[in-house]
Amino acid sequence: MLRPYWQKGGLRTLSEEAFQTTVTFPHLVYGGNETTATIVTGTTPDRHGYTMDSYFQRRTRSIRTMLEDESVHGIGTSLQLSAQSLLTPTMADKMRIMFPTSKIYAIGIQPQATILLAGHAANACCWLDASGKQWVATSAYNEGLPSAAYEQNKNERIADLAAHLWTPRMEISTYTHPTTQEKKKSFSYDVSKHLTRSPEANTLVIELALALQQSEQLGTDATPDMILMHLNSLSPAATSDRIGSAEQEDMYLWLNQDLGYLMEQLDRRIGRTNYQIMLVGRPVLGIDIQTMSDIHMPVQPFNIDRAAALTSAYLMALYGHERWIDGAYGQSIYLNRSLIGQKQMNMEAIQRQVANFLMEFEGVQLAFPNYEAIRYPLLETSLCKKHIGDVVFLLQPGWQLKQDDTHIIDQVIDENPTAPLLLWSGLIRPMPQGTLDATDVADLIFQ
């Protein structure tokens, strides 16, 4: 759709020359990095363990970030993150296994996605700190903050780009999807306030990738190297993965330019036949609620905190005024196992009672004790024993899962979310046929 606007190179070259297909996901998709984890590991959440961006920790009865790791420290950041909770190897790990002397770097906009790309065995992993206007990293990787990132921090490159004002590259009337508001007044953003959702963020990632290629001489010997980049195509006002505004189109125009520059530099530095590019999307926002409403399919909220409170009241009425529920997160209710054990009650019987009670809620399609949920076709690939609750439920189509009235868990309400994949190679190589399961993406790059 946007190809006529793209200059030569970048997305235009990829769209004309690359193998293209659609990626499907064999598990629940929420709009977090569970899809990233599946793509980079070639396995589903029941195996790789990354079911959602956060999880409920029974010990503290709190919701924690999935990649949180107190055994490491942040470099330039207070975040303590690593891939230690990822249970299976990533494509970066497979590269390290196949080629022990490979140089592998992950660079990105958002920390969790970038760490998942880095896996366990990258040389280094760094991401944008929007508030500090600098590259930051984690001690989980041997090289810490790469020298190329340190030099950009020293030269204040991020601050320089963040000082820009983002306005349309073209006249607003020439875009194909300007909103009514944009037609009245062209969009304008202070990049420093919207850095991670601005074109400049992608520019910074690609600039650092090229700086690393130069400083580490990536791709210049017989051993293959790898750079994994987390880029962004969502503009500040985007509410959907579908393009519905001039500013979203503008993001793609900038991305085309940045990818074109990347390919131009790689052609010059290491030769067109000495690298390949895989560009993979992932569902983040899906179809927005307003679009669903416009076609007379309204989306209704399901508040998991409220459901847990009502379940707690139900159990109190049956068994007395005690804390029967430890918490709730995602599509799981976590029972107070210690209390149930102390009172020598039948755990499975209570799980069944709670599941039957949840079945009475409007919007709930099915509810199971956890030992049954892990055998249900869709849930068995979506749940991990490490984080599963005691009772698990599925919502009917047309319902959106929320933790409370404001925190949305299920951003993607599409029934069958998909993502695009483009694979470009300077050499002729075998390509698959038809759509591609997300679990097949990681191995595709090694074929």
Image (cartoon, rainbow, N blue to C red):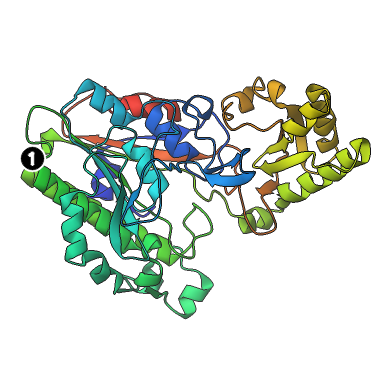
**Residue 67 picture quarter:** top left
- Between 309 and 304, the residue placed more toward the observer is 309
Residue 64 point in image, percent of width and height: 54, 45
- Between 202 and 117, the residue placed more toward the observer is 117
**Residue 98 picture quarter:** top left
Q: Is residue 266 left or right of residue 248?
A: left
Q: Does residue 180 lie above or below 403 as drawn?
A: below
- Between 80 and 418, the residue placed more toward the observer is 80
The residue that appears at 37% across and 29% down in the rendered structure is: 441
Q: Which residue is mark 1?
A: 270
How many numbered marks appear? 1
Query: What is the quadrant of the C terminus in the image?
Result: top left
State the SS at label 1: loop
Q: Does residue 97 lie above or below 15 as drawn?
A: above
Residue 392 point in image, percent of width and height: 70, 32
**Residue 21 picture quarter:** top left
Residue type pointed to by label 1 = Ile
Asked if residue 86 shows in the view, the reply is yes
The residue that appears at 57% across and 30% down in the rendered structure is: 382
Q: Is residue 324 left or right of residue 128?
A: right
The residue that appears at 49% across and 53% down in the rendered structure is: 242
- Between 303 and 75, the residue placed more toward the observer is 75
Q: Is residue 55 left or right of residue 15?
A: right
Q: Is residue 373 left or right of residue 91?
A: right
